[in-house]
Image: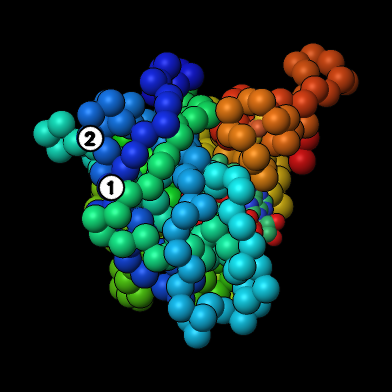
Amino acid sequence: MSEKCSATKRGEYWATVRANKQIGERFYRLGLEFSGAGAEAFARVQAGQFAELDLSSAALPSAETIPQELVDAAGRKILLRRPFSFADVDTRDDRTLVDILYCVVGPATLRMTTLAAGGSVSVIGPLGNGFRVPDGKKTALLAAGGMGAGPLQHLAKILTADFPQIDAVAFAGAKTAEELPFERRLDKIAQQLEFSLPEFARYGVRSLVATDDGSAGFAGPVTDCFSEWLGKSDLAGESMVIYSCGPEQMLARVAEIAKTRNIDCQVSMERRMACGIGICQSCAVECRVADSAETVYKLCCEDGPVFDSKEVVF
Ligand SMILES: Cc1cc2nc3c(=O)[nH]c(=O)nc-3n(C[C@H](O)[C@H](O)[C@H](O)COP(=O)(O)OP(=O)(O)OC[C@H]3O[C@@H](n4cnc5c(N)ncnc54)[C@H](O)[C@@H]3O)c2cc1C
Ligand code: FES
């Protein structure tokens, strides 16, 4: 993890569904279990890596439960696999258990809600690279927007287990409290103590919440909350590393803050992905070439999804 992710045995594996729990109006946590070669392949998956799930044969939920704005899209055939990252990875005996935090936004994620315990799903992975921990860092700042919280929960777990010398603080934002993809509601005292989200607190990681409408935590964009926290901190820029995952506009702002304060920063980019394995070229990310005014296009699925924020042209 301290440098680029190690080689993983990527392939197509079948996973058994352990659970598929609804945790919010549109949010679910899907638990999958791999055995055999799949268990081996996913056991060492890095935070930020992802997998492509085949949801083409999953059933649609009953018509009355389909949100009005997805009714038209619901009937579309799912021709392509969909990319998802991991919120947790655990090994038990010879099995690997992974959790995926997902939001229902279209036909594939709608069908995903009907995956039931005992069922199975085809998964290609692990894919892409993961977050890296540069040498000499003392503080890691995890900035999540919306569904970006998933891979950062996984990262919080890895930092706590493998890098105990690093103190981590998480920042999680959404438009409203209802749109925060976490299981339990926020408690004021926990918020004041900066341990408000159990998903991070379980790893001893403090967390601050921000909502655009002020319905929970800091009132305003999570990047303002993040910037305010940094403004009050006397930590040296070189001792910190920022990890961010969320909407592109938010990543651009985080990259700007990191640049101003001279802090290393890694961002997990999202692109529509047709293949996930570097063939279709549909996931280009414009990147700067070091010491040059030129730019090149890199592939989000193969060169990313995690990029150095200085590299990305937002
Ligand atoms: C590396 C990676 C990791 C991801 N991890 C997760 C995760 O952990 N949890 C999760 O809920 N989602 C994750 N996503 C996004 C997820 O893949 C999409 O939400 C999913 O494909 C939607 O499928 P759908 O058929 O339900 O909706 P679609 O009809 O495919 O999309 C619904 C709407 O969302 C937009 N959209 C879909 N995918 C993207 C994208 N990649 N970038 C920008 N806009 C998009 C579409 O333009 C459309 O407006 C990840 C994406 C990437 C690239
Ligand atoms: S998704 Fe096909 S090349 Fe990246």
Q: Disc 1 to disc 2, how far (Cα)? A: 9 Å
Rendered-image quadrant of the C terminus: top right
Residue at position x 47%, y 54% in the image: 57
Q: In the rendered image, which quarter is residue 269 located in?
A: top right
Residue 243 pos. (x, y %): 51, 39
Residue 53 pos. (x, y %): 47, 45
Residue 175 pos. (x, y %): 59, 70
Labels in figure, total: 2
Secondary element type, mark 2: loop
Residue type indicated by callout 1: Thr
Q: Is residue 268 left or right of residue 5?
A: right
Residue 236 pos. (x, y %): 51, 33
Task: Give the labeled residue for mark 1.
Answer: 16
Task: Give the labeled residue for mark 2.
Answer: 35
Residue 277 visible in the current orientation: yes
Residue toward you, 249 or 118: 118
Neighbourhood count class around disc 2 (C-alpha, 10 Å): few under 14, some 14–19, many 20 upward: some
